[in-house]
Image (spheres, rainbow, N blue to C red):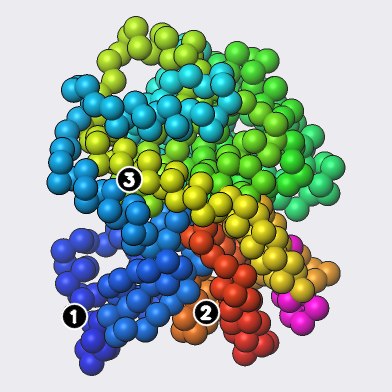
């Protein structure tokens, strides 16, 4: 029941009336945010919150260089890609230079969902097959085709007939993760074949964000990718969440596995909050699609979007944010692991760079998930001015992916606050 004396009550009621019941809000006490700066978000009352969750504003909220680039280009010209414009070409050159040389073409969209949808269309056109393999708790987008390949949307979202899932062996011994996952992919290929469906692609988020976060051991994806390619299928690396330096050791999550994907999809952090996304693809993979279908996106690749995306690359390079993600991320993971000596519910800490998952479990010797405790921890942190969320099939893994400008002092504040919340809940 909404408290009518709560100043947020009118806003909540208005939201429900205007937006309907399908939208969701974070936290038991929703936040009304009005401003952001760097790693901080500010609510309507002026209270600031340490943002340890929003990887979209990857180079910091309201980053001045990005804001200036958007404003200057918007004041000059904004149109679509059916006119010649240097901005989209300059950005494509810079983007492709960060990727394996086999990826020779870039295409632009507005959202990661669109990018994954376009990648799937290209893969199906190239292979002549329809089958798609994803992980069992994946999220890849909200178009009709991608929602049917995003089981994390919930039980009401029926998987497509040409979609098959494989369980990520999240808690297997490190030397067994690769073999178990590859065996699961081979089983999925066989399952599709039994339905009369050939495999077009394996599509994975390369840090498995929704499945509970898994980046290690490096190289574990290679056998699964080889299994798909043996059937004539493609490997689509969904870098919408792990891309642009977040994993620290590499600019792209797939690079930790020594792989060169057939298609790479991009989004979320690409424009630091401005809607820009896209993909990179091997030229020979794009040929048949280009022969059969023209591609046009009214807003994808527009001059303002390209200015925003270019400014993001500038900031990452100038502020050495990939190295910052590596160094601060390592410090943060070590600090989180030390919490296990004080709190029996702290389980495994996984991740790379500034993309981290921490399990909350019944006990250090009993890894059964604790979703109820996880929800209390997330809301307890919000009450104390730290924002993060939870992920995984049981929603029992804390999901930590702050802006790349996160510093050691911010990491220490996060860990100290988490320590305090867990002490209170013990």
Q: Earlier in the sequence, mark 2 or mark 3?
A: 3
Residue most toward the front?
A: 318
Where residue 13 sits, quadrant-wise, is bottom left
Q: Secondary structure at mark 2?
A: helix
Q: Which residue is label 1 attached to?
A: 10
Residue drawn at (21%, 68%) of the image: 15
* Image side of residue 72 versus residue 167, left or right: left
Q: Is residue 175 shown in magenta?
A: no
Does residue 79 appear to the left or right of 109 in the view shown? left
282 or 163: nearer the eye? 282
Residue extent of the magenta highlight: 339-348
Residues at marks 2 and 1, CA–CA distance in whole angstroms: 25 Å
Which label lies toward us, 2 or 1?
A: 2
**Left or right: where 108 falls relative to 419:** left
Residue 185 visible in the snapshot: yes
Disc 2 and disc 3: Cα gap in Å? 32 Å
The C terminus - image quarter: bottom right
Say above or below: 391 vs 143: below
Q: Which residue is mark 3?
A: 308
**Rendered location of residue 417, percent (x, y):** 59, 82
Dot in front, 2 or 3: 3
Q: Is residue 344 magenta?
A: yes
Spatial CA span between label 3 and label 1 = 35 Å
For mark 1, give the secondary structure.
helix
Vertical order, 54 against 185 (above or below): below
Residue nearest the observer in this picture, 56 or 7: 56
Residue denoted by label 2: 381
Residue 260 image position (x, y, % from top left): 62, 26
């Amino acid at each position: 029941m909404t408290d009518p004396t709560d100043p947020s009550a009118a806003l909540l009621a208005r939201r429900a009336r205007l937006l309907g019941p399908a939208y969701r809000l974070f936290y038991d006490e929703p936040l009304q945010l009005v401003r952001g700066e760097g790693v901080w978000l500010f609510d309507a009352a002026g209270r600031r919150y340490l943002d340890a969750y929003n990887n979209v504003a990857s180079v910091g909220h309201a980053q001045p260089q990005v804001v200036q680039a958007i404003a200057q280009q918007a004041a000059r010209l904004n149109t679509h890609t059916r006119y010649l414009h240097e901005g989209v070409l300059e950005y494509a050159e810079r983007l492709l230079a960060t990727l394996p040389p086999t990826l020779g073409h870039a295409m632009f969209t507005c959202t990661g969902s669109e990018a994954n949808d376009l990648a799937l269309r290209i893969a199906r056109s190239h292979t002549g097959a329809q089958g798609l393999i994803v992980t069992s708790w994946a999220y890849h987008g909200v178009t009709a085709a991608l929602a049917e390949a995003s089981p994390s949307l919930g039980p009401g979202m029926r998987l497509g007939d040409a979609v098959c899932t494989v369980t990520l062996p999240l808690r297997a011994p490190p030397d067994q993760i690769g073999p178990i996952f590859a065996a699961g992919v081979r089983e999925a290929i066989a399952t599709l074949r039994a339905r009369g469906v050939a495999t077009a692609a394996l599509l994975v988020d390369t840090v498995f964000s929704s499945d509970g976060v898994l980046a290690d051991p490096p190289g574990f994806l290679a056998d699964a990718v080889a299994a798909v390619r043996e059937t004539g299928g493609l490997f689509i690396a969904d870098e919408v969440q792990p891309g642009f330096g977040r994993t620290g050791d590499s600019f792209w999550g797939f690079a930790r596995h020594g792989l060169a994907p057939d298609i790479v999809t991009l989004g979320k952090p690409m424009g630091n909050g401005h809607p820009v996304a896209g993909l990179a693809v091997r030229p020979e993979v794009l040929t048949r699609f280009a022969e059969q279908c023209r591609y046009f996106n009214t807003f994808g690749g527009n001059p303002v979007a390209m200015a925003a995306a270019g400014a993001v690359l500038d900031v990452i390079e100038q502020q050495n944010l990939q190295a910052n993600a590596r160094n601060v991320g390592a410090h943060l993971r070590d600090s989180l692991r030390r919490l296990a000596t004080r709190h029996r519910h702290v389980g495994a800490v996984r991740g790379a760079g500034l993309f981290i998952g921490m399990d909350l479990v019944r006990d250090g010797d009993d890894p059964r998930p604790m979703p109820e405790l996880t929800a209390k921890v997330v809301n307890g942190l919000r009450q104390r001015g730290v924002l993060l969320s939870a992920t995984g099939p049981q929603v029992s893994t804390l999901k930590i992916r702050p802006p790349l400008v996160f510093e050691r002092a911010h990491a220490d504040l996060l860990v100290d606050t988490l320590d305090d919340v867990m002490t209170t809940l013990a």
